[in-house]
Amino acid sequence: MKIKQSFITAAVLSMAAFSAQAQFAKPEDAIKYRQSVLTVQARAFGAINAMNQGTVPFNATAAQTNAHIIATLATLPWTAFGAGTENAKTKPEIWSDAAGFKASSDKYVAAANALETATKTGNADQVKTAWGALAGTCKQCHDAYRK
Amino acid sequence: MKIKQSFITAAVLSMAAFSAQAQFAKPEDAIKYRQSVLTVQARAFGAINAMNQGTVPFNATAAQTNAHIIATLATLPWTAFGAGTENAKTKPEIWSDAAGFKASSDKYVAAANALETATKTGNADQVKTAWGALAGTCKQCHDAYRK
């Protein structure tokens, strides 16, 4: 039973990887895409951090706009880590520990959605806390899966 | 009065350009950012086009998700065309005809929002029509402002 379950899990993961890869004509397209998504998110992330740090005044509307950008794109980068899309920044654990990578990206998505929810309160402290939690998921994933 | 209005318009445009530029530490950051936004949008745009062309079956949810990505990012690229951010793809008209460039990007934003509205109907024909209108605004801007 356990073996059967493992086989099904492996088959589903392989199909998911194949499907994600098949969405891109070339591996370099997938790499460019995931880097682009992360670049757009990083800027929105930085805009909220500037408010948290007091570099710019807290602006509830701007916080919400930027959090919505992050949340809207949160699921997208992970579709572009199909087999054969290794580059200088990727650790092999992305593929050898696919379940861990998936769990890590799921945490990121949940934290991105929580940040958007926090910005809707208009409360700067709640935004700061939720931003910190999201930053934690970035770091955890980078430590484990990025060179 | 007309002169005064022109002066104010010019001053506001300069401030807008300065502000947009000031948001990026380096011109290459602005270029990377706008290219990243357009790369993410292009993929969502292509996903809807594949449905329009029948390459993949029409999927109302996927159409809406992709249109929401496009609409969420629609205003972002234009903030990254500050003075000093010329590159191999930019025509000088982006800056010499700033009002025309602004009008062109406004049309794009409106068409992106209209596409999202169309996807909410779940009607494939309406999505196709709205997608075509958006594609028209891309082409118009590329013809006028992209090398």
Image (cartoon, coloured by chain):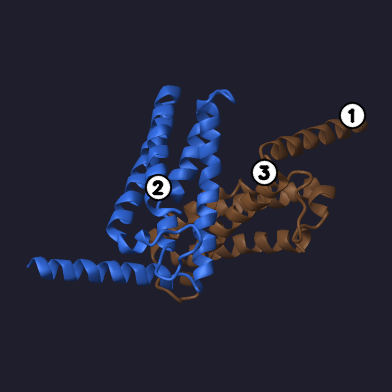
Chain colours: A brown, B blue
Judge whether residue B7 can be spotted in this image: yes
Residue A68, position as x, y percentages in the image: 48, 52
Q: Which residue does the numbered mark 1 point to in the structure image?
A: A4
Asked if residue B130 is positioned above or below residue B97 in the image, the reply reads: above
Q: Label 2 to label 3, Cα distance in Å?
A: 32 Å
Asked if residue A92 is positioned above or below residue A129 in the image, the reply reads: above
Q: Which residue does the numbered mark 3 point to in the structure image?
A: A79
Respond whether the residues carrying marks 2 and 3 are from the same subunit: no
Mark 1 or 3 closer to N-term?
A: 1
Asked if residue B91 is positioned above or below residue B15 in the image, the reply reads: above
- Check disc 3 and give the amino acid type: Thr
Residue B86, position as x, y percentages in the image: 46, 65
User: Seen in the image, is B79 located left or right of residue A137?
Assistant: left
- Please rate how many residues cluster around mark 2, counting C-alpha atoms within 10 Å: few if below 14, some from 14 to 19, many from 20: few
Q: Which residue does the numbered mark 2 point to in the structure image?
A: B143
Q: Chain of mark 2?
A: B
- Camera-near label (1 vs 2) is 2
Compare residues B130 and A64 and report the one nearer the observer: B130
